[in-house]
Image: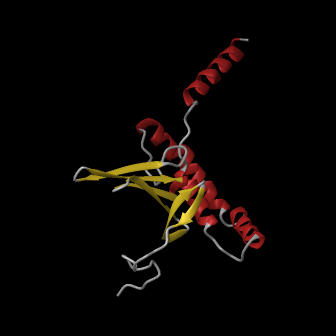
Amino acid sequence: MKKIFKTALVGLLSFGLLSNCFGKFGAIKAVYSFNAGIQIGSGKLASFFRSLLMIFPLYIAYGIGSFLDILIFNLIEFWTDRNPIAMAEYDFDGKLVKEYSENGQTITLTYTEWGKVLRMDAPTAKGMESVYFLKDKPEKAYRLINGKYVEIQQVSGPILPPMTAKHI
């Protein structure tokens, strides 16, 4: 009876020590985003091939990533409150806010959905205005109107060369 009581007590105390010890799992997210970026075909065919890649060749990468995230990076993050790999700045909802100030004016950059959407809040003559940039469409800017992204029409030439331009 004493042995069962001691085992239950140790288990209960161990559970208390490990509760709320959940990291950001950046290594698994890196493997998952690599897998999601593979484009073979379109529609259901692409999903089928990505699923095959996730199940067969990438399962080793998922296993290694899980091991590193759970046993190493999660412990480091738990004790130091810093994750040594990417995505450590994002909160648990996938949001990151950065502010840049110069000459009394502040621009706020808000990354959401783990960097898929960037909202830039900048001062203008009308007050603060928000412009959105989507990771899937890097050369376009948008405004959010009634919950939908509406493209801002370009009125002058590009300031920077397009991403597909070859550099000399």
Q: Which residue shows up at 68% across the image and 19% down it?
A: 8
The vertical placement of 26 against 74, above or below, is below
Q: Which residue shows up at 41% across the image and 85% down it?
A: 166
Residue farthest to the front? 126
Q: Which residue shows up at 64% across the image and 60% down it?
A: 60
Instruction: Residue 43 in the image: state x and y as whole percent.
Output: 74, 71
Name the one closer to the observer, 75 or 82.
Answer: 82
Can residue 89 be seen by looking at this rendering? no
The vertical placement of 165 against 92, above or below, is below
Instruction: Residue 127 in the image: state x and y as whole percent.
Output: 37, 51
| Image-quadrant location for residue 6 | top right
Q: How many marks?
A: 0
Q: Is residue 92 left or right of residue 85?
A: right
| Image-quadrant location for residue 47 | bottom right
Instruction: Residue 161 in the image: state x and y as whole percent.
Output: 39, 80
Assign the C terminus to one quadrant of the image: bottom left
Residue farthest to the bottom? 168
Assign the N terminus to one quadrant of the image: top right
Q: Which residue shows up at 60% across the image and 54% down it?
A: 146
